[in-house]
Amino acid sequence: MAAFDFDIGILGGGAAGLTIASGSAQLGARTLLVERQSVLGGDCLHFGCVPSKTLIRSAQVYHLVKHSGQFGLPVVDPPPVDFQQIVRRIRSVIGAIQKHDSEERFCGLGVKVEFGQAVFTDEHTVELNGRRITSKHWVIATGASPSAPPVDGLDQSGYITNRDVFFMDRLPGSMIILGGGPIAMEMAQAFCRLGSKVSVIQRSDQILTREDRDMADDVMKVLQQEGVRFFLNTSILAVRDTGGQKEVVFRQKGLEGSFVVAADSLLVAMGREANLTGLGLENIGVKFTRKGLSLDDRLRTRHNHIYGAGDVTGAFQFTHAAGYEGGIVISNSVFHFPRKIDYTYLPWCTYTDPGLASIGMNEKRAGAAGINYSVRMEAFSANDRSLAEGEARGRIKLILDDKGKPIGVQIFSLFAGELLNEWVAVFNGGVRLSTLAAAVHPYPTVGESSKKVAGAVMADKLFSDPVKKGLKFFFHLKGRACELPDKLPKAED
Protein backbone atom coordinates (compact mmCIF):
# COMPACT_ATOMS: atom_id res chain seq x y z
CA MET A 1 0.00 0.00 0.00
CA ALA A 2 1.32 3.44 -0.95
CA ALA A 3 2.31 5.73 1.92
CA PHE A 4 0.67 9.16 1.78
CA ASP A 5 1.27 12.24 3.93
CA PHE A 6 -2.46 12.60 4.60
CA ASP A 7 -5.61 10.53 4.43
CA ILE A 8 -7.56 13.43 2.97
CA GLY A 9 -6.51 16.81 1.64
CA ILE A 10 -8.98 19.64 1.03
CA LEU A 11 -8.37 22.63 -1.22
CA GLY A 12 -10.52 25.52 -0.06
CA GLY A 13 -11.43 26.82 3.40
CA GLY A 14 -15.04 27.82 2.73
CA ALA A 15 -18.24 26.14 3.87
CA ALA A 16 -17.65 22.85 2.06
CA GLY A 17 -13.97 22.61 2.93
CA LEU A 18 -14.49 23.43 6.60
CA THR A 19 -17.30 20.86 6.89
CA ILE A 20 -15.16 18.11 5.37
CA ALA A 21 -12.04 19.03 7.35
CA SER A 22 -13.89 19.13 10.66
CA GLY A 23 -15.75 15.87 10.10
CA SER A 24 -12.80 13.95 8.70
CA ALA A 25 -10.39 14.95 11.47
CA GLN A 26 -12.87 14.12 14.22
CA LEU A 27 -13.38 10.70 12.65
CA GLY A 28 -9.66 10.03 12.90
CA ALA A 29 -8.48 10.82 9.37
CA ARG A 30 -5.18 12.67 9.01
CA THR A 31 -6.49 15.83 7.40
CA LEU A 32 -4.93 18.72 5.48
CA LEU A 33 -6.82 21.94 4.73
CA VAL A 34 -5.32 24.35 2.20
CA GLU A 35 -6.68 27.89 1.75
CA ARG A 36 -5.23 30.30 -0.80
CA GLN A 37 -6.40 33.39 1.13
CA SER A 38 -4.88 34.44 4.46
CA VAL A 39 -7.95 33.49 6.53
CA LEU A 40 -10.52 30.71 6.59
CA GLY A 41 -14.23 31.15 6.03
CA GLY A 42 -14.56 31.57 2.30
CA ASP A 43 -16.92 33.82 0.38
CA CYS A 44 -19.89 33.23 2.67
CA LEU A 45 -18.19 34.68 5.72
CA HIS A 46 -16.24 37.48 4.10
CA PHE A 47 -18.23 38.58 1.03
CA GLY A 48 -21.55 36.73 1.02
CA CYS A 49 -24.08 35.43 3.53
CA VAL A 50 -22.72 37.05 6.67
CA PRO A 51 -22.08 40.62 5.44
CA SER A 52 -25.23 40.63 3.30
CA LYS A 53 -27.53 39.57 6.12
CA THR A 54 -25.87 42.06 8.46
CA LEU A 55 -26.42 44.86 5.93
CA ILE A 56 -30.01 43.73 5.32
CA ARG A 57 -30.76 43.89 9.05
CA SER A 58 -29.36 47.42 9.36
CA ALA A 59 -31.46 48.50 6.39
CA GLN A 60 -34.55 46.86 7.89
CA VAL A 61 -34.16 48.69 11.20
CA TYR A 62 -33.63 52.02 9.43
CA HIS A 63 -36.75 51.32 7.34
CA LEU A 64 -38.79 50.59 10.48
CA VAL A 65 -37.60 53.82 12.13
CA LYS A 66 -38.72 55.82 9.10
CA HIS A 67 -42.14 54.13 9.25
CA SER A 68 -42.63 54.24 13.02
CA GLY A 69 -46.01 55.93 12.59
CA GLN A 70 -47.44 52.69 11.20
CA PHE A 71 -46.93 51.11 14.63
CA GLY A 72 -48.69 53.84 16.63
CA LEU A 73 -45.37 55.49 17.53
CA PRO A 74 -44.19 59.07 17.08
CA VAL A 75 -43.14 59.82 13.50
CA VAL A 76 -39.36 60.06 13.22
CA ASP A 77 -37.25 61.65 10.50
CA PRO A 78 -33.84 59.99 10.97
CA PRO A 79 -30.65 61.61 9.66
CA PRO A 80 -28.95 60.15 6.56
CA VAL A 81 -27.05 56.90 6.91
CA ASP A 82 -23.32 56.97 7.68
CA PHE A 83 -22.30 53.91 5.68
CA GLN A 84 -18.98 53.63 7.51
CA GLN A 85 -20.86 52.82 10.71
CA ILE A 86 -22.63 49.98 8.89
CA VAL A 87 -19.27 48.79 7.51
CA ARG A 88 -17.86 48.72 11.05
CA ARG A 89 -20.84 46.63 12.19
CA ILE A 90 -20.37 44.24 9.27
CA ARG A 91 -16.69 43.81 10.10
CA SER A 92 -17.48 43.18 13.78
CA VAL A 93 -19.95 40.41 12.92
CA ILE A 94 -17.45 38.83 10.52
CA GLY A 95 -14.80 39.03 13.23
CA ALA A 96 -17.02 37.31 15.79
CA ILE A 97 -17.76 34.43 13.43
CA GLN A 98 -14.14 34.25 12.23
CA LYS A 99 -13.18 32.91 15.66
CA HIS A 100 -15.14 29.75 14.87
CA ASP A 101 -13.36 29.46 11.52
CA SER A 102 -9.85 30.08 12.84
CA GLU A 103 -6.69 28.08 12.21
CA GLU A 104 -6.39 27.50 15.96
CA ARG A 105 -9.85 25.95 16.24
CA PHE A 106 -9.24 23.57 13.37
CA CYS A 107 -5.81 22.67 14.67
CA GLY A 108 -7.54 21.78 17.92
CA LEU A 109 -9.75 19.40 15.97
CA GLY A 110 -6.65 17.78 14.48
CA VAL A 111 -6.60 19.51 11.08
CA LYS A 112 -3.32 20.72 9.59
CA VAL A 113 -4.04 24.13 8.03
CA GLU A 114 -1.81 25.55 5.30
CA PHE A 115 -2.15 28.80 3.35
CA GLY A 116 -1.12 29.18 -0.28
CA GLN A 117 -1.93 28.09 -3.83
CA ALA A 118 -1.85 24.33 -4.31
CA VAL A 119 -1.18 22.89 -7.79
CA PHE A 120 -1.69 19.25 -8.73
CA THR A 121 1.41 17.58 -10.14
CA ASP A 122 -0.16 14.13 -10.24
CA GLU A 123 -3.44 12.66 -9.06
CA HIS A 124 -2.22 12.18 -5.46
CA THR A 125 0.24 15.07 -5.18
CA VAL A 126 0.09 18.84 -4.98
CA GLU A 127 2.88 21.38 -4.88
CA LEU A 128 2.37 23.96 -2.14
CA ASN A 129 4.80 26.71 -1.15
CA GLY A 130 7.71 24.85 -2.73
CA ARG A 131 6.86 21.49 -1.14
CA ARG A 132 5.24 18.35 -2.51
CA ILE A 133 2.38 16.96 -0.43
CA THR A 134 0.59 13.67 -1.02
CA SER A 135 -2.86 12.52 0.07
CA LYS A 136 -4.90 9.37 -0.42
CA HIS A 137 -8.00 11.46 -1.15
CA TRP A 138 -8.32 15.02 -2.38
CA VAL A 139 -11.31 17.37 -2.32
CA ILE A 140 -11.58 20.43 -4.55
CA ALA A 141 -13.69 23.00 -2.70
CA THR A 142 -12.22 26.25 -3.98
CA GLY A 143 -15.53 28.08 -4.38
CA ALA A 144 -16.54 30.59 -7.02
CA SER A 145 -16.12 34.28 -7.82
CA PRO A 146 -18.49 36.83 -9.36
CA SER A 147 -18.39 36.96 -13.13
CA ALA A 148 -19.25 39.84 -15.46
CA PRO A 149 -20.93 39.69 -18.88
CA PRO A 150 -18.95 40.66 -22.00
CA VAL A 151 -20.44 44.14 -22.32
CA ASP A 152 -18.76 46.90 -24.28
CA GLY A 153 -17.11 49.36 -21.90
CA LEU A 154 -17.90 47.49 -18.67
CA ASP A 155 -14.32 46.74 -17.65
CA GLN A 156 -13.14 50.22 -18.58
CA SER A 157 -15.97 51.97 -16.73
CA GLY A 158 -15.47 50.14 -13.47
CA TYR A 159 -18.01 48.25 -11.40
CA ILE A 160 -18.40 46.58 -8.04
CA THR A 161 -19.44 43.04 -7.05
CA ASN A 162 -20.33 41.32 -3.79
CA ARG A 163 -16.62 41.50 -2.90
CA ASP A 164 -16.79 45.32 -2.77
CA VAL A 165 -20.36 46.35 -2.03
CA PHE A 166 -20.26 45.78 1.75
CA PHE A 167 -17.13 47.84 2.32
CA MET A 168 -17.67 51.02 0.27
CA ASP A 169 -16.43 54.34 1.62
CA ARG A 170 -19.88 55.89 1.47
CA LEU A 171 -23.47 55.16 0.59
CA PRO A 172 -23.97 55.86 -3.13
CA GLY A 173 -26.69 58.35 -3.94
CA SER A 174 -27.80 56.04 -6.74
CA MET A 175 -27.03 52.50 -7.84
CA ILE A 176 -27.64 50.38 -10.93
CA ILE A 177 -27.79 46.62 -10.37
CA LEU A 178 -27.23 44.29 -13.30
CA GLY A 179 -29.05 41.01 -12.61
CA GLY A 180 -32.26 39.80 -11.04
CA GLY A 181 -31.18 36.92 -8.83
CA PRO A 182 -31.29 36.62 -5.02
CA ILE A 183 -28.15 38.72 -4.38
CA ALA A 184 -29.40 41.44 -6.72
CA MET A 185 -32.83 41.58 -5.05
CA GLU A 186 -31.46 41.59 -1.52
CA MET A 187 -29.04 44.40 -2.32
CA ALA A 188 -31.65 46.36 -4.29
CA GLN A 189 -34.00 46.51 -1.32
CA ALA A 190 -31.27 47.09 1.27
CA PHE A 191 -29.64 50.03 -0.53
CA CYS A 192 -33.01 51.51 -1.45
CA ARG A 193 -34.02 51.43 2.22
CA LEU A 194 -30.75 53.02 3.25
CA GLY A 195 -31.37 55.94 0.88
CA SER A 196 -29.89 55.05 -2.54
CA LYS A 197 -31.97 55.40 -5.70
CA VAL A 198 -31.82 51.89 -7.13
CA SER A 199 -32.46 50.68 -10.68
CA VAL A 200 -32.40 46.97 -11.60
CA ILE A 201 -31.67 45.86 -15.17
CA GLN A 202 -32.57 42.22 -15.81
CA ARG A 203 -32.10 40.20 -19.00
CA SER A 204 -35.15 37.89 -18.64
CA ASP A 205 -38.80 38.83 -18.27
CA GLN A 206 -38.95 38.12 -14.51
CA ILE A 207 -36.71 38.42 -11.48
CA LEU A 208 -35.72 35.33 -9.45
CA THR A 209 -36.02 33.05 -12.48
CA ARG A 210 -35.87 29.83 -10.40
CA GLU A 211 -39.16 30.80 -8.77
CA ASP A 212 -42.73 30.74 -10.03
CA ARG A 213 -43.60 34.01 -11.69
CA ASP A 214 -46.45 34.86 -9.32
CA MET A 215 -44.20 34.55 -6.26
CA ALA A 216 -41.32 36.43 -7.93
CA ASP A 217 -43.74 39.16 -8.97
CA ASP A 218 -44.85 39.49 -5.33
CA VAL A 219 -41.26 40.23 -4.37
CA MET A 220 -40.85 42.71 -7.21
CA LYS A 221 -44.07 44.52 -6.29
CA VAL A 222 -42.83 45.09 -2.73
CA LEU A 223 -39.51 46.45 -3.97
CA GLN A 224 -41.27 48.70 -6.50
CA GLN A 225 -43.49 50.09 -3.74
CA GLU A 226 -40.36 50.94 -1.77
CA GLY A 227 -38.86 52.80 -4.73
CA VAL A 228 -36.77 50.31 -6.75
CA ARG A 229 -37.07 50.72 -10.53
CA PHE A 230 -37.08 47.61 -12.73
CA PHE A 231 -36.19 47.19 -16.40
CA LEU A 232 -36.94 43.63 -17.58
CA ASN A 233 -36.44 41.82 -20.88
CA THR A 234 -33.33 43.81 -21.66
CA SER A 235 -30.17 43.43 -23.70
CA ILE A 236 -27.28 45.59 -22.50
CA LEU A 237 -25.50 47.43 -25.30
CA ALA A 238 -22.77 49.33 -23.48
CA VAL A 239 -21.55 50.80 -20.22
CA ARG A 240 -19.96 54.25 -20.04
CA ASP A 241 -18.16 56.23 -17.36
CA THR A 242 -19.13 59.90 -17.69
CA GLY A 243 -16.59 61.10 -15.16
CA GLY A 244 -18.98 61.13 -12.23
CA GLN A 245 -21.50 58.44 -12.98
CA LYS A 246 -21.89 55.10 -14.73
CA GLU A 247 -24.28 54.92 -17.66
CA VAL A 248 -25.85 51.68 -18.88
CA VAL A 249 -27.25 51.66 -22.41
CA PHE A 250 -29.80 48.94 -23.15
CA ARG A 251 -32.76 47.87 -25.22
CA GLN A 252 -36.05 46.43 -23.98
CA LYS A 253 -37.90 43.76 -25.88
CA GLY A 254 -40.96 45.15 -27.66
CA LEU A 255 -39.86 48.79 -27.37
CA GLU A 256 -38.26 50.96 -30.02
CA GLY A 257 -34.84 52.52 -29.57
CA SER A 258 -32.40 52.28 -26.70
CA PHE A 259 -32.51 53.57 -23.14
CA VAL A 260 -29.92 55.00 -20.76
CA VAL A 261 -29.85 54.77 -16.95
CA ALA A 262 -27.17 56.61 -14.97
CA ALA A 263 -26.06 56.15 -11.36
CA ASP A 264 -23.15 56.76 -9.00
CA SER A 265 -22.38 53.07 -8.60
CA LEU A 266 -22.78 49.95 -10.75
CA LEU A 267 -23.20 46.56 -9.05
CA VAL A 268 -22.82 43.48 -11.24
CA ALA A 269 -24.71 40.46 -9.91
CA MET A 270 -25.05 38.27 -12.98
CA GLY A 271 -23.65 34.91 -11.99
CA ARG A 272 -20.46 33.30 -10.73
CA GLU A 273 -17.51 31.39 -12.14
CA ALA A 274 -15.90 28.42 -10.38
CA ASN A 275 -12.38 29.02 -9.02
CA LEU A 276 -10.66 26.18 -10.88
CA THR A 277 -7.92 27.76 -12.96
CA GLY A 278 -4.39 27.57 -11.61
CA LEU A 279 -4.95 24.28 -9.77
CA GLY A 280 -3.16 22.18 -12.36
CA LEU A 281 -6.28 20.16 -13.13
CA GLU A 282 -5.13 19.81 -16.72
CA ASN A 283 -2.08 17.97 -15.35
CA ILE A 284 -4.28 15.16 -14.03
CA GLY A 285 -7.03 15.11 -16.67
CA VAL A 286 -9.82 16.48 -14.49
CA LYS A 287 -12.46 18.09 -16.71
CA PHE A 288 -14.14 21.37 -15.82
CA THR A 289 -15.87 24.39 -17.32
CA ARG A 290 -16.42 27.93 -16.08
CA LYS A 291 -19.51 26.63 -14.30
CA GLY A 292 -17.75 23.85 -12.41
CA LEU A 293 -16.21 20.39 -12.28
CA SER A 294 -17.43 17.35 -14.18
CA LEU A 295 -18.64 15.10 -11.33
CA ASP A 296 -20.63 11.90 -10.92
CA ASP A 297 -23.53 11.49 -8.49
CA ARG A 298 -21.08 10.69 -5.68
CA LEU A 299 -19.27 14.00 -6.33
CA ARG A 300 -16.21 12.25 -7.81
CA THR A 301 -14.12 13.47 -10.71
CA ARG A 302 -12.76 10.97 -13.27
CA HIS A 303 -10.41 9.91 -10.46
CA ASN A 304 -12.49 8.15 -7.81
CA HIS A 305 -10.35 9.54 -4.99
CA ILE A 306 -10.69 13.20 -6.07
CA TYR A 307 -13.97 14.89 -5.16
CA GLY A 308 -15.62 18.25 -5.67
CA ALA A 309 -17.88 20.08 -3.20
CA GLY A 310 -19.37 23.53 -2.76
CA ASP A 311 -19.69 26.10 -5.54
CA VAL A 312 -17.33 24.14 -7.81
CA THR A 313 -20.05 21.52 -8.35
CA GLY A 314 -21.89 24.04 -10.53
CA ALA A 315 -25.18 22.97 -8.92
CA PHE A 316 -26.61 25.07 -6.07
CA GLN A 317 -24.38 27.85 -4.82
CA PHE A 318 -25.65 28.02 -1.25
CA THR A 319 -23.69 27.60 1.96
CA HIS A 320 -26.09 24.93 3.22
CA ALA A 321 -25.74 23.07 -0.09
CA ALA A 322 -21.96 23.13 0.39
CA GLY A 323 -22.34 21.70 3.88
CA TYR A 324 -24.60 18.94 2.57
CA GLU A 325 -22.15 18.11 -0.21
CA GLY A 326 -19.38 17.99 2.39
CA GLY A 327 -21.30 15.26 4.19
CA ILE A 328 -21.60 13.29 0.95
CA VAL A 329 -17.83 13.47 0.47
CA ILE A 330 -17.13 12.33 4.03
CA SER A 331 -19.49 9.38 3.61
CA ASN A 332 -17.76 8.25 0.41
CA SER A 333 -14.13 9.00 1.27
CA VAL A 334 -13.84 8.38 5.02
CA PHE A 335 -16.60 5.87 5.78
CA HIS A 336 -16.32 4.28 2.31
CA PHE A 337 -20.11 4.13 2.36
CA PRO A 338 -21.44 4.83 -1.16
CA ARG A 339 -23.78 7.80 -1.00
CA LYS A 340 -25.25 9.75 -3.90
CA ILE A 341 -26.16 13.40 -4.03
CA ASP A 342 -29.90 14.19 -3.97
CA TYR A 343 -31.11 17.78 -4.26
CA THR A 344 -34.84 16.89 -4.32
CA TYR A 345 -35.56 18.66 -1.03
CA LEU A 346 -32.81 21.24 -0.97
CA PRO A 347 -34.30 24.45 0.46
CA TRP A 348 -33.31 28.01 -0.35
CA CYS A 349 -34.35 31.51 0.58
CA THR A 350 -34.10 35.02 -0.84
CA TYR A 351 -33.73 37.32 2.16
CA THR A 352 -35.77 40.27 1.03
CA ASP A 353 -38.38 41.66 3.43
CA PRO A 354 -40.76 39.82 3.18
CA GLY A 355 -38.57 36.91 2.10
CA LEU A 356 -39.22 34.15 -0.41
CA ALA A 357 -38.31 30.59 0.59
CA SER A 358 -38.72 27.37 -1.42
CA ILE A 359 -38.32 23.63 -1.14
CA GLY A 360 -39.12 20.83 -3.57
CA MET A 361 -41.17 21.36 -6.69
CA ASN A 362 -42.79 24.62 -7.70
CA GLU A 363 -45.25 24.99 -10.58
CA LYS A 364 -42.46 25.73 -13.03
CA ARG A 365 -40.47 22.60 -12.21
CA ALA A 366 -43.51 20.36 -11.83
CA GLY A 367 -44.77 21.41 -15.26
CA ALA A 368 -41.35 20.80 -16.82
CA ALA A 369 -41.31 17.32 -15.26
CA GLY A 370 -44.75 16.51 -16.68
CA ILE A 371 -46.34 16.16 -13.24
CA ASN A 372 -50.08 16.72 -12.84
CA TYR A 373 -50.34 18.98 -9.84
CA SER A 374 -52.70 21.19 -7.87
CA VAL A 375 -52.05 24.27 -5.75
CA ARG A 376 -53.29 25.32 -2.31
CA MET A 377 -52.73 28.80 -0.92
CA GLU A 378 -52.88 30.31 2.55
CA ALA A 379 -52.64 34.10 2.84
CA PHE A 380 -50.87 35.62 5.83
CA SER A 381 -53.53 38.33 5.94
CA ALA A 382 -55.59 35.70 7.80
CA ASN A 383 -52.82 35.07 10.36
CA ASP A 384 -53.26 36.87 13.69
CA ARG A 385 -49.53 37.18 14.43
CA SER A 386 -48.85 38.65 10.99
CA LEU A 387 -51.49 41.32 11.63
CA ALA A 388 -49.98 42.09 15.05
CA GLU A 389 -46.52 42.37 13.50
CA GLY A 390 -47.84 44.83 10.92
CA GLU A 391 -46.76 42.53 8.08
CA ALA A 392 -49.75 40.75 6.59
CA ARG A 393 -48.34 40.50 3.07
CA GLY A 394 -47.52 37.15 1.58
CA ARG A 395 -48.76 33.59 1.38
CA ILE A 396 -47.85 29.93 1.53
CA LYS A 397 -48.11 28.08 -1.76
CA LEU A 398 -48.36 24.29 -1.42
CA ILE A 399 -47.88 22.10 -4.52
CA LEU A 400 -49.60 18.69 -4.50
CA ASP A 401 -49.31 15.83 -6.98
CA ASP A 402 -52.37 14.13 -8.48
CA LYS A 403 -52.60 11.85 -5.43
CA GLY A 404 -52.70 14.77 -3.02
CA LYS A 405 -49.13 14.25 -1.80
CA PRO A 406 -47.13 17.44 -1.12
CA ILE A 407 -44.21 17.85 -3.53
CA GLY A 408 -43.17 21.43 -2.86
CA VAL A 409 -43.74 24.59 -0.85
CA GLN A 410 -43.01 28.27 -1.43
CA ILE A 411 -43.40 30.87 1.29
CA PHE A 412 -43.46 34.62 0.74
CA SER A 413 -43.59 36.08 4.20
CA LEU A 414 -42.05 37.61 7.25
CA PHE A 415 -39.61 34.99 8.61
CA ALA A 416 -39.95 32.96 5.37
CA GLY A 417 -36.70 31.06 5.90
CA GLU A 418 -37.60 30.12 9.47
CA LEU A 419 -41.09 29.04 8.41
CA LEU A 420 -39.60 26.80 5.73
CA ASN A 421 -37.71 24.78 8.34
CA GLU A 422 -40.92 23.00 9.39
CA TRP A 423 -41.43 21.94 5.78
CA VAL A 424 -37.80 20.76 5.60
CA ALA A 425 -38.69 18.34 8.41
CA VAL A 426 -41.97 17.39 6.73
CA PHE A 427 -40.38 16.48 3.40
CA ASN A 428 -37.21 14.87 4.69
CA GLY A 429 -39.02 12.99 7.46
CA GLY A 430 -41.88 11.76 5.29
CA VAL A 431 -44.41 13.48 7.59
CA ARG A 432 -48.00 13.24 6.40
CA LEU A 433 -50.11 16.36 5.94
CA SER A 434 -52.61 14.88 8.38
CA THR A 435 -49.87 14.73 11.02
CA LEU A 436 -48.89 18.34 10.38
CA ALA A 437 -52.51 19.47 10.44
CA ALA A 438 -53.14 17.64 13.74
CA ALA A 439 -49.96 18.90 15.44
CA VAL A 440 -50.51 21.64 18.03
CA HIS A 441 -48.79 24.90 17.08
CA PRO A 442 -48.35 27.75 19.58
CA TYR A 443 -50.64 30.76 19.22
CA PRO A 444 -50.11 33.40 18.00
CA THR A 445 -47.32 32.47 15.59
CA VAL A 446 -46.78 33.00 11.89
CA GLY A 447 -46.04 29.27 11.70
CA GLU A 448 -49.70 28.46 12.30
CA SER A 449 -50.20 29.16 8.60
CA SER A 450 -48.32 25.95 7.77
CA LYS A 451 -50.74 23.99 9.93
CA LYS A 452 -53.64 25.84 8.35
CA VAL A 453 -52.70 25.15 4.71
CA ALA A 454 -52.18 21.47 5.57
CA GLY A 455 -55.52 21.47 7.38
CA ALA A 456 -57.24 22.99 4.37
CA VAL A 457 -56.16 20.02 2.27
CA MET A 458 -57.42 17.57 4.90
CA ALA A 459 -60.67 19.55 5.31
CA ASP A 460 -61.72 18.65 1.77
CA LYS A 461 -61.83 15.02 2.85
CA LEU A 462 -62.99 15.48 6.44
CA PHE A 463 -65.95 17.77 5.67
CA SER A 464 -66.99 16.02 2.46
CA ASP A 465 -70.59 15.00 1.72
CA PRO A 466 -69.88 11.26 2.11
CA VAL A 467 -68.49 11.84 5.63
CA LYS A 468 -71.44 14.01 6.59
CA LYS A 469 -73.91 11.48 5.22
CA GLY A 470 -72.19 8.67 7.12
CA LEU A 471 -72.30 10.56 10.40
CA LYS A 472 -75.93 11.44 9.84
CA PHE A 473 -76.79 7.80 9.17
CA PHE A 474 -74.94 6.30 12.14
CA PHE A 475 -75.37 9.04 14.74
CA HIS A 476 -78.56 10.76 13.57
CA LEU A 477 -77.01 14.21 13.23
CA LYS A 478 -79.61 16.81 12.31
CA GLY A 479 -77.58 19.07 9.99
CA ARG A 480 -77.32 22.85 9.83
CA ALA A 481 -78.86 25.00 12.54
CA CYS A 482 -78.69 28.29 10.66
CA GLU A 483 -79.03 29.47 7.10
CA LEU A 484 -78.32 32.95 5.78
CA PRO A 485 -81.13 34.52 3.78
CA ASP A 486 -80.63 34.82 0.04
CA LYS A 487 -80.71 38.60 0.38
CA LEU A 488 -79.51 40.28 3.54
CA PRO A 489 -81.59 43.31 4.67
CA LYS A 490 -80.06 46.67 3.89
CA ALA A 491 -79.02 48.92 6.77
CA GLU A 492 -81.25 51.96 7.23
CA ASP A 493 -79.80 55.37 6.53
Image (cartoon, grey):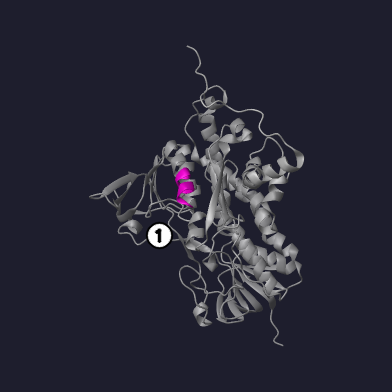
Q: Is residue 105 left or right of residue 249?
A: right
- Residue 51 percent across, percent down from the top left: 56, 49
**SS for callout 1:** loop
* Magenta stretch: helix, strand or loop mostly: helix
Q: Quadrant of residue 203?
A: bottom left
Residue in the picture at 70% in, 34% down: 478
Is residue 441 something one can see in this rendering?
Answer: no
What residue is drawn where x is 59% and y is 45%?
416
Image side of residue 108 versus residue 345, left or right: right
Q: Is residue 218 magenta?
A: yes
Find the residue positioned furthest to the top.
493
Pick whichever, 470 or 216, lies toward us: 470
Question: How many marks can you see?
Answer: 1
Q: Which residue is mark 1?
A: 148
Q: Decide which of 419, 117 is in the foreground and name it.
A: 419
Q: Quadrant of residue 301?
A: bottom right
Q: Amino acid at mark 1?
A: Ala
Classify residue 402 by image quadrant: bottom right
Q: Point out residue 410 in the picture as x, y percentages from the top left corner.
A: 56, 50
Q: Which quarter of the rendered picture does the N terminus lie within?
A: bottom right
Task: Tell me, yes or no, if residue 98 can be seen here.
Answer: yes
Residue at the left extreme of this rendering: 257
Please say whether residue 175 is one of the residues in the magenta stretch: no
Give the image location of residue 21, x and y in percent: 68, 67
Crowdedness near tag 1: few (<14), some (14–19) or many (≥20) residues, C-alpha within 10 Å: some
User: Is 203 situated above or below 295?
Assistant: above
From what the image shows, is residue 24 above or below residue 245?
below
| Image: magenta residue range | 212-219
Residue in view at x 62 percent, y 49 percent: 420
Residue 134: percent from the left, percent from the top? 64, 80
